[in-house]
Image (cartoon, rainbow, N blue to C red):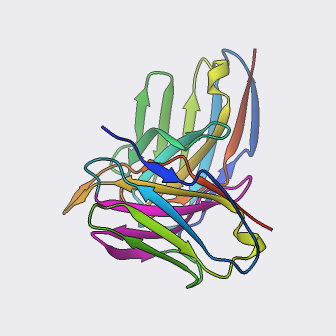
């Protein structure tokens, strides 16, 4: 089955700096890669996703890049703000609506 | 549009007991997936239900079972509870229609504590 590894496990950044989280996956059949943000005590919320026919996708301060050959994808958050503090999970799947294999999560802390 | 809801929010059980968790899918969604999230870890896929039938299962024993009803709501049942079953149980709903694939939206979860 799919195995997703996520690094780093914790990330502390100064407000206004950038944050980068990296994930690798093992199953070459995976072609859908969402990123979820989970605040303490709340549900995971989709923040951005990318499919394997696209190498990069951007939404305001958030971007995701995908290298399907190397089987890794990354989340980039620019101009970080205190409200970006949360746990971020990457995931991989064969389909948008099928079983998601999650990474272990990255706790991001934005220092004011 | 109504979001995904789950009940109860919290539950305490003792080892060996049985538990039923409930999920109401988002309006217009016909697929429900269940995930187990242990403390400090990412969610782990338990199984998925599509049109009232199991449509894929993760690495969980048969004492984890489920149902989906005609209104697409779903139940997760866990028999013979073990201490390691203590976790946040999340359901996610989506709409599947042939080749159409839509995003999974998560509910707030049920936090289960097994003593």
Q: Position of residue B24 (x, y in %)?
A: 40, 54
Residue occupying image coordinates x 54% and y 56%: B90
Q: Relative to B112, is A98 on the left or the right?
A: left
Left or right: where B53 falls relative to A74: left
Identify the magenta region: B30-56
Q: Is residue A59 above or below residue B9?
A: above
Residue B74 falls within the magenta-colored stretch = no
Magenta segment main secondary structure: strand
Quarter of the C terminus of chain A within the rendering = top right
Residue located 45% across and 38% down the image: A48
Residue A13 coordinates in the image, percent (x, y): 74, 25
- The image shows residue B74 at horizontal and vertical percentages of 41, 64
Residue A34 makes an appearance in the image = yes
- Residue projecting furthest to the right: B115
View extreme (bottom): residue: B62
Q: Nearer the viewer, residue B49 or A75?
A: B49
Q: Residue furthest left?
A: B98
Residue A98 visible from this viewpoint: no
Q: Magenta segment: does it hold B32?
A: yes
Q: How many marks?
A: 0
The residue positioned 44% from the left and 54% from the top of the image is: B92
When asked about the image quadrant of residue B16, the answer is bottom right
Vertical comparison of A44 with A100: above or below: above
Pinpoint residue B72: horizontal percent, then vertical percent: 31, 61
In the depicted structure, whether residue B78 falls above or below residue A43? below
Question: Residue at horizontal 28%, vertical 61%?
Answer: B71
* In the displayed structure image, the side of residue A106 where residue A64 appears, left or right: left
Foreground pick, A4 / A38: A38
């Amino acid at each position: 089955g799919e195995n997703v590894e996520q690094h780093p496990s914790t990330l502390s950044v100064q407000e206004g700096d950038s944050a980068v989280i990296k994930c690798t996956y093992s199953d070459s059949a995976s072609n859908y890669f969402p990123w979820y943000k989970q605040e303490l005590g709340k549900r995971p919320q989709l923040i951005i996703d990318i499919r394997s026919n696209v190498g990069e996708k951007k939404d305001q301060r958030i971007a995701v890049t995908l290298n399907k050959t190397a089987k890794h994808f990354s989340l980039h958050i620019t101009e970080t703000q205190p409200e970006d503090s949360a746990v971020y999970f990457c995931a991989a799947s064969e389909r948008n609506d099928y079983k998601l294999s999650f990474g272990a999560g990255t706790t991001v802390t934005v220092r004011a | 549009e109504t979001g995904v809801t789950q009940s109860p929010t919290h539950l305490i059980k003792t080892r060996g007991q049985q538990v039923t968790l409930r999920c109401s899918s988002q309006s217009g969604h016909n697929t429900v997936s269940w995930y187990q999230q242990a403390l400090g870890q990412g969610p782990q896929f338990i199984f998925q239900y599509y049109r009232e039938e199991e449509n894929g299962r993760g690495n969980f024993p048969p004492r984890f079972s489920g149902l989906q009803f005609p209104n697409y709501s779903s139940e997760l049942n866990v028999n013979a509870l073990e201490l390691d079953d203590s976790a946040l149980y999340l359901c996610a709903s989506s709409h599947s229609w042939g080749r159409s694939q839509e995003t999974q939206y998560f509910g707030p979860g049920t936090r289960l504590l097994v003593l």
